[in-house]
Image (tube, rainbow, N blue to C red):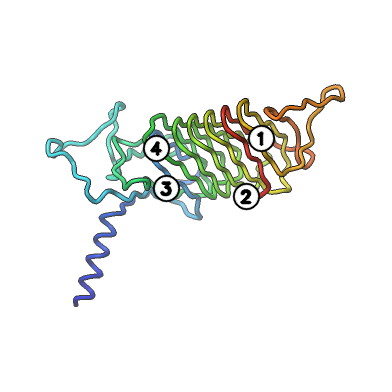
Amino acid sequence: MKYLLTTIIMCVALIAGAQEYKVAHNGGKLILEGVDDVKIEAYDGSEVIFSINSKKDHKESERAAGLKPINSLGLEDNTDIGLSVSKDGENLKAIQIGQCMCRDNEGYTIKIPKSMGIDYSHSTYDSDHLRIKNVNKEIVVSTNYTNINLEDVTGPMSIKTVYGDIEAKFASLNQNSSVSLNSVYGFVDAAIPSTSKARLNLRTPYGQIYTDFDIKVETTDGMRSLTDKKIEGTVNNGGVDLILKSGYENIYLRKK
């Protein structure tokens, strides 16, 4: 009996610490606006699963008893985990309502069907990281302060951050549309399979470009432009556009 009681208490504590919200959705994009510290992973399923590890010591203000937080659009938390989630045509949209009540540096974990792409935007300094894994559909990201980590992705994608770093490990390089990774003040580090076919555009006015690929540099009237700040060329006889840019830090293009 004592063992059973202990098990029940542990399960209740786990449920209290980690909360979930599920919605059936396939195809389209997951649109995230202003959601802090997110981990997204594609899986074989037909539901979008939002989860959060909440702060155990978080308490609502006594003055807010019986009231709900809303944002400037008048949206309310309809998930009980600080998000307003709604269908937007073929897409699913999630907007954070108020401050993220999650444990430090943990934030939200979101699992999406493999049929979905991602459109993420964030403008404040409240989000430290965005991690995306196993997504083979289009990814669009626009942030100011967020570090971005991409793992086992394929593109197409357009990634831009102002103060964050970008690290990307590609499972393959999709040949249907371009891949662009752009950080204004952070570094850009991309690893692609050694057999990837790509047309390269690498630029960093104040950093350095590093690679272990044999790049065939483009020529104009038989002449090559020799600079370590801007490189245009191809690997494996060319293919999809691969654009890596950093305003002030280094660029790394490496074989996976």
Mark 4 / mark 3, whichever is N-terminal: 3
Residue 127 disc label? 4
Secondary structure of residue under mark 1: strand
Asked if residue 209 lies left or right of residue 109, the reply is right
Foreground label between 4 and 3: 4
Which residue shows up at 12% across the image and 35% down it?
Answer: 63
Graded by Cα atoms within 10 Å as few (under 14), some (14 to 19) or many (20 or more), the crowding at tag 2 reads: some
The reply to whether discs 4 and 3 touch (Cβ–Cβ < 8 Å) is no
- Give the quarter of the image for residue 8: bottom left
SS of the residue under disc 3: strand
**Residue type at the position of mark 2:** Ala
At 37% from the left and 46% from the top, the residue drawn is 105
- Across and down, in percent, residue 99 comes to 29, 37
Residue at the spot of label 3: 110
- Residue beneath disc 2: 171
Q: Earlier in the sequence, mark 1 or mark 4?
A: 4
